[in-house]
Image: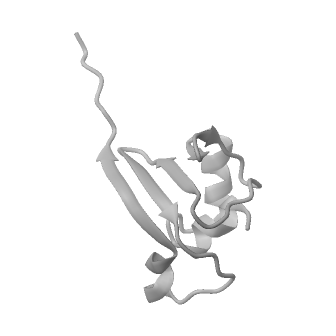
Amino acid sequence: MRLDKFLKISRLIKRRTLAKEVADQGRITVNGNQAKASTAVKVEDELVITFGQKILTIKIDDLRENVKKDEAQSLYTVIKDEPVAKKDPF
């Protein structure tokens, strides 16, 4: 499954076009490698997503084409959810 499609279906990012933009900006890595929107993801892959003020590390547990909203979180496990380190101005 494509990375941008997985991010939309899992509801980590609301729209597929937004997922594509985030990936094209280099803010997503798959198993330590920078990923594009078209990168193929599979079960057991580890994603690191840099949002505005946090870094989210997840492991993919399942891939499905359609999923209900309340079941979307069953597609992944959050490994780490940490704030972005602020740079010291001095």
- Is 61 located above or below residue 85 in the figure? below
Location of residue 78 in the rendering, given as x and y in whole percent from the top left corner: 39, 62
Location of residue 45 in the rendering, given as x and y in whole percent from the top left corner: 59, 58
What color scheme is it? one colour
Q: Nearer the viewer, residue 70 or 32?
A: 32
- Image quadrant in which you'd find residue 84: top left
Task: Name the residue at the top extreme.
Answer: 90
Location of residue 56 in the rendering, given as x and y in whole percent from the top left corner: 41, 52
Say which residue appears at 48% left-offset and 69% top-offset.
76
- Is 63 located above or below residue 25 in the figure? below
Say which residue appears at 43% left-offset and 87% top-offset.
70
- Is 10 located above or below residue 86 in the figure? below
- Is 23 located above or below residue 8 in the figure? above
Looking at the image, can residue 15 be seen? no
Task: Name the residue at the right extreme.
Answer: 38
Q: Nearer the viewer, residue 51 or 72?
A: 72
Location of residue 60 in the rendering, given as x and y in whole percent from the top left corner: 54, 66
Q: Quadrant of the C terminus?
A: top left
> Could you tell me how many numbered marks the image carries?
0
Instruction: Describe residue 5's horizontal placement relative to residue 56 as left or right.
Output: right
Instruction: Describe residue 1's horizontal placement relative to residue 33 as left or right.
Output: right
Say which residue appears at 74% left-offset and 58% top-offset.
40
Q: Quadrant of the N terminus?
A: bottom right
Looking at the image, can residue 60 be seen? yes
Q: Nearer the viewer, residue 21 or 68?
A: 68
